[in-house]
Image (cartoon, helix red, strand yellow):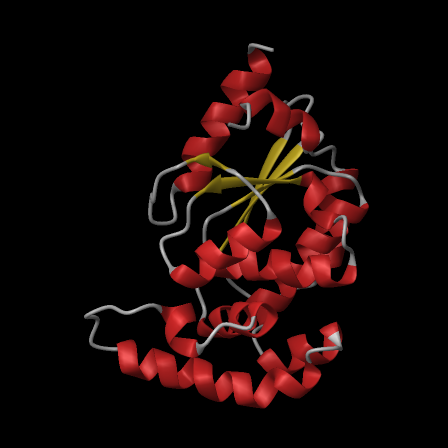
Amino acid sequence: MTCLHDELLRAGVRRVEQVRRVRVDEPGDGRLEADGLVDGGADLVVVDAVRAEPATAAVALLLDLEPVAAVGTTAAPDWAERVVEVRDTLRRVRPHLGDLDGLLDALDDPVLTRTTQLLERLSARRTPVLLGDSTTVLAGGLLAVRRSAGAGTWWLASGRPAGPAGTAALQALGLVPLLDLELAGDASRHALAVVREAVGGA
């Protein structure tokens, strides 16, 4: 079993005096945003994002999952609609698999693009990141490591995502969730408290 302190050391977390939280819910330039956070002295950046179906399709494409496997099987009234949306998105974006920028353009999700840029740039600036448990954040992580294989070195996973696409992305990234709980989007807040306590007591 992975020790919490080992995970913190792996991700470069030495102190948490300056923690910045980012909730990605609208378009923006993630690279400029990351530079501003790092230049502002952030020791750790917590990244959350709203859920969007293009992120599920992105995970399905990158991990070669069938739409039903990516969406999961539920009794939700919009289940069939979601599966069809992922299937249609896969057909549209598959030709861009080898081109990250082209893929992001084809997915046409500004939140996913900003999240990917943010994670990629924060890693390039060697800044630890606590990932939220949404599929959008984890899909952004998968896309970021497509361009920079070592990007995930600087990331911590806050919790276990609720959906199958997020779960598959987390496994592919090789990250161990700090909290093995499905907290429905609130995992990063609880995980940050755990990180603060661990670093403070180290």
Residue plotted at (46% across, 26% down): 193
Residue 72 vs 166, above or below: the answer is below
Front residue of 117 and 84 = 84
- Residue projecting furthest to the top: 201
Q: Residue 19's x, y, as percent?
A: 60, 32
- Nearer to us in this view, 120 or 37: 120
Instruction: Reply above or below: 139 against 34.
Output: below
The residue shown at (50%, 74%) is 57
Vertical arrangement, residue 154 with respect to residue 94, above or below:
above
Q: Which residue does the image show at 45% across and 69% down from the upper left?
A: 52
Q: Quadrant of the C terminus?
A: top right
The total number of labels drawn is 0
Q: Does the image show residue 115?
A: no
Left or right: residue 182 versus residue 144 is left
In this view, 75 is above or below 131: below
Q: Quadrant of residue 102?
A: bottom right
Q: Quadrant of residue 5?
A: top right
28 vs 49, nearest the viewer = 49
Residue 45 locus on image (x, y percent): 62, 39
x 78%, y 56%: residue: 148
Q: Position of residue 118 (x, y in %)?
A: 68, 55
Residue 122 image offset from top left, x and y in percent: 73, 47
Q: Is residue 86 visible in the rendered structure shown here?
A: yes
Q: Is residue 127 left or right of residue 179?
A: right
Left or right: 144, with 161 as reference point:
right
